[in-house]
Image: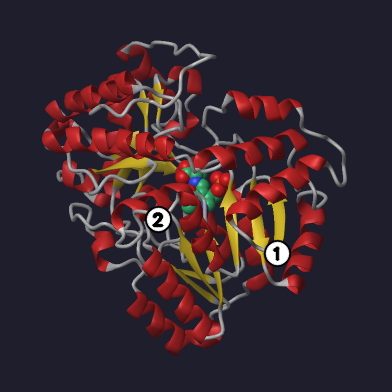
Amino acid sequence: MKTIIEPFRIKSVEPIRMTTREERARLLEAAGFNLFKLHSDDVIIDLLTDSGTSAMSAAQWGAVMTGDESYAGAPSFYRFEAAVKDLMDFTHIIPAHQGRAAEHLLFSLIAKTGDLIPSNTHFDTTRGNIEAMGAEALDLPIAEGRVPSLDHPFKGNMDLAALERVLTEEGGRIPAVMMTITNNAGGGQPVSLENIRGAARLAKAHGKAFYIDGCRFAENAWFIKLREEGQKDRSIKEIVRETFALADGMTMSAKKDAFANIGGWLALNNDALAERARTLLIQTEGFPTYGGLAGRDLDAIAQGLKEIIDEDYLRYRVRTNAYIAERLDAMGVPVVKPAGGHAVFIDARAFLPHIPPLEYPGQALTCAMYETGGIRACEIGTVMFGRKPDGTEAPGAMDLVRLAMPRRVYTQSHADYVVEVLEDVAATKDTLKGLRIVKEPPMMRHFTAAFERL
Ligand code: F0G
């Protein structure tokens, strides 16, 4: 059959509250033109994030009921640990309440003032945790990864020549090399196995640890299977296992590729580092067999990890985004090519050339999408990355708007609706205005900043 259908049927539903355009215009103004401040029941299609928004399966809800809430040594922990090790065979699996908690543990222990941590592209919480230690988070994506309109099978790859150069020139400042799969901030783009091998090899040659931020590991493995030479006959599990065997540890948000609503982990092979991490975990998150989670959350993750590597699911998952991206492209809305694993990214800088980066074209587009059709998307551009640690402001590398797809939540007609709303926005795009920030916190301003329309 030609149509790739949702490989599930729906047993339990949540109603969507419909709103009018007038109502949304009022709500948007009251939210200071920051969509993070909206109440989610005022949103029709919520594409703010794919994080923690998955629909859990009947088997996951069943596992929730068998969760054991003992403080220490709960069987839920051992099921969780076994499920993680089945895919990522690290010596120590340390649960945490979400990805950024795992990052906080890792960088509190391995980074200090003046250090430098290279990556293909750090996600914003990773960057925040590194900078909070006084260290520098350095992005080294391949050149193709910075050009939204350019098609490339592994746009998330790291520039290995640049990595080798910094390792040689700045090695004394570098405690570890990091790789984010898929590269979220760079457009949800995959990293090839060859590139992961190359980065691991360089890190090892310079005596540095190599860590993977594995949030969307299953989507990354699917792209490797589809696009990388010699990989098409391997199972997703084999590809995932090889990926993580190349690393000394990983950070993970189970809110992405584990179908869980909360959770994460830090995994390590280094015994001494793991002991220090567990000590810090007890201080900040909880005992090492629950790490800030309920036993039932650990069971939901254990089951989710079994489901996420299903090829029918991954085929449908990636196809939904590709479908939206193709239709947007056909009507002249500039999208990051090819479509990413968890999201479609619109190039707002190219779509709204009359709005300069420091008037936030991405934010202007998210506001227009909400006002027009009740869609909530997320700016990934100058609002998110424009404020530098020294207090100055500069345009982000790109001004993207991310339409992130919650896993197993929306259907084909929801996807068609998203396309229609953008068709409507495109028809009057020249009338859209930029914004000015009227209030912002010192860090991670995109979550709480308030704006005014110019
Ligand atoms: N790393 C990557 C690549 C991420 O995308 C995220 C979260 C994290 C780490 C942090 O994990 O949220 O569990 O603390 N990304 C979400 C998003 C918030 O919308 O992309 P967390």
Residue assigned mark 1: 91
From the viewer's perspective, is residue 259 above or below residue 127? above
Q: How is the image coloured?
A: secondary structure
Residue 281 in picture, x, y percent from top left: 77, 56
Residue at 40% x, 62% y: name it: 392
Residue 167 in picture, x, y percent from top left: 45, 84
Earlier residue among tags 2 and 1: 1
Secondary structure of the residue carrying tag 2 is loop
From the viewer's perspective, is residue 158 above or below residue 213? below
Is disc 1 surrounded by few (<14), some (14 to 19) or many (20+) residues within 10 Å? some
Residue 340 in picture, x, y percent from top left: 33, 46
Q: CA distance from mark 2 to mark 1?
A: 25 Å
Disc number for residue 56: none
The yes-or-no answer for disc 2 within 8 Å of ligand 1 is yes
Residue at 67% x, 69% y: name it: 269
Which quarter of the figure has residue 387?
bottom left
280 relative to 83 in the view: left or right: right
Q: Quadrant of the C terminus?
A: top left
In front of the other: label 2 or label 1?
1
Q: Is residue 443 visible?
A: no
From the viewer's perspective, is residue 226 above or below residue 62? below
Residue assigned mark 2: 183
Labelled pair 2, 1 in contact (Cβ < 8 Å): no
Disc 2 marks a residue whose amino acid type is Asn
Disc 1 marks a residue whose amino acid type is Thr
Is disc 2 surrounded by few (<14), some (14 to 19) or many (20+) residues within 10 Å? many
Q: Nearer the viewer, residue 209 or 3?
A: 3
Q: Quadrant of the N terminus?
A: top left
438 relative to 215 in the view: left or right: left
268 relative to 159 in the view: left or right: right
Q: Residue furthest front?
A: 233
